[in-house]
Amino acid sequence: MTTPDKAASTQPFSLDGRHALVTGGSSGIGEATVKELVRAGAFVWIADINLPAAEALAGSIGSAQAIPMDVTSPSSIAAAVARLNRLDILVNNAGIGHVGSIEATEPEDFDRLLNVNVRAVYLVTRAFLPLLLAAADANSGSVGAIVNIGSVSGQVGIKQRFAYCTSKGAVLAMTRQLAVDYPKTLRVNAVCPGTIQTPFVEAYLEKFHKHNKEEVRAELRARQPMGRMGRPEEVASMVRYLASDEAAFITGSLFTIDGGLTAA
């Protein structure tokens, strides 16, 4: 991999010449991350089960290409891997949510959360690992980078989020474990957002609080000490930093972006 001369870079946290892949990249945090990585100079593969949305995003920003991927399907992931000959940055962003205590979480709900939020991260990471390891450049010291999108729900208990908290806790554990196994050939970190204003949150409000959306929306804002929800772009900026050479000494770390929720 040819890494740009940092001294000659026109912007901080440059990703010039890097190739990235973002799962669930067509909306929400994934979409914002795709745009930020392209802005930083990377070429980005937008991996999503919703191919039309991914194609529309790629067409609107340039330096990006849509690629169909069901992150729960080994054959779908393998087909995506076969299309790439290089990968420097992997962002494991795809995920789903669930509301309910352990008593209200049926086994099929629990299995679905683990399948999408945990097993898929394993499948995608394992499949792309050879390309990521090949990205290491002994001359510059650069190595492949993985950024997992975790959640504050993996760090603290959140009411009525039994399955979701469990799944995100596993993602954070995987992040640390991978960093320990590949300390010199791969950097692996996680971003842990609080409640972010995305279609994910809107779908949650529509499904579980259709008749009191604004009341619950206000509660979501209030539970974060800053009094607002985060913006996808704020999470994307952290992903960009962690993927850049400025973060070369960072691995196995969790970066919380939650408006102060876990500090309160």
Image: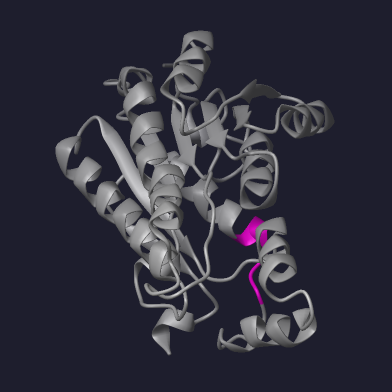
Judged left or right of residue 14, residue 211 is: right
Which residues fall within the magenta stretch? 229-234
Q: Position of residue 106 (x, y in %)?
A: 42, 62
Q: Position of residue 212 (x, y in %)?
A: 77, 83
Q: Quadrant of the C terminus?
A: bottom left
Judged left or right of residue 112, residue 176 is: left
Residue 135 in view in this figure: yes
* Closer-to-camera residue (149/20): 149
Q: Position of residue 191 (x, y in %)?
A: 44, 57
Residue at 45% from the left image edge and 72% from the top image edge: 104
Against 170, is 143 above or below? above
Residue at 53% from the left image edge and 10% from the top image edge: 83
Q: Position of residue 221 (x, y in %)?
A: 65, 83
Queried whether the magenta region covers residue 81, the answer comes back as no
Residue at 52% from the left image edge and 45% from the top image edge: 93
Residue 132 in view in this figure: no
In terms of image quadrants, where is residue 208?
A: bottom right
Q: Quadrant of the N terminus?
A: top left
In terms of image quadrants, where is residue 231?
A: bottom right
Against 130, is 252 above or below? below
Residue at 46% from the left image edge and 56% from the top image edge: 109
